[in-house]
Image (tube, grey):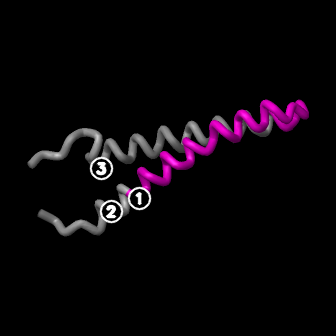
Amino acid sequence: MPMSPKNSKAGLALNLGSSALAIVRTVKQVRRARGTQDALTVLNTLAGLLPLITSALLVLRRLRGRSQEPAR
């Protein structure tokens, strides 16, 4: 059975890369918001960061699971 594009190693790596870039961008937004002393913006940005971290961790778990599968 052929792998679907979203389950390919390249697709997972691309997904991980885009998640990492989004995390970096959001961390920069948090730093900017902290500089302005705007607590609501900081909280909003941190709330947006949590799903990005979760997404990256899920992709890492899938990549690790692929490396432990026996070759077919």
Check if residue 54 falls in the magenta segment: yes
The residue depicted at 48 percent of the width and 38 percent of the height is 18
Q: Circle 3: is it few (<14), some (14-19), or many (20+) Cα within 10 Å?
A: some
Check if residue 19 falls in the magenta segment: no
Q: Circle 2: is it few (<14), some (14-19), or many (20+) Cα within 10 Å?
A: few
Q: Nearer the viewer, residue 69 or 14?
A: 69
Q: Are marks 1 and 3 in contact (CB under 8 Å)?
A: no
Sequence-wise first label, 2 or 3: 3
Question: Which residue is the site of mark 2?
Answer: 65
Quadrant for the C terminus in the image: bottom left
Mark in front: 2 vs 3 = 2
- State the CA–CA distance, disc 1 to disc 2: 6 Å
Question: Which residue is the site of mark 3?
Answer: 9
In the rendered structure, which amino acid carries the disc numbered 3? Lys
- State the CA–CA distance, disc 2 to disc 3: 11 Å
In the rendered structure, which amino acid carries the disc numbered 2? Gly
Residue found at the far right of this picture: 37
Q: Position of residue 60 (x, y in %)?
A: 43, 55
Residue 58 in the figure: left or right of residue 22: left
Q: Which residues are magenta?
A: 33-61
Residue 19 in the figure: left or right of residue 62: right
Q: Secondary structure at mark 3?
A: helix
Q: Position of residue 59 (x, y in %)?
A: 41, 50
Question: Which residue is the site of mark 1?
Answer: 61
Sequence-wise first label, 1 or 3: 3
Residue 1 in the figure: left or right of residue 62: left
Q: Are marks 1 and 2 in contact (CB under 8 Å)?
A: yes
Q: Are marks 2 and 3 in contact (CB under 8 Å)?
A: no
The residue depicted at 52 percent of the width and 49 percent of the height is 54
In the rendered structure, which amino acid carries the disc numbered 1? Arg
Q: Nearer the viewer, residue 43 or 60?
A: 43
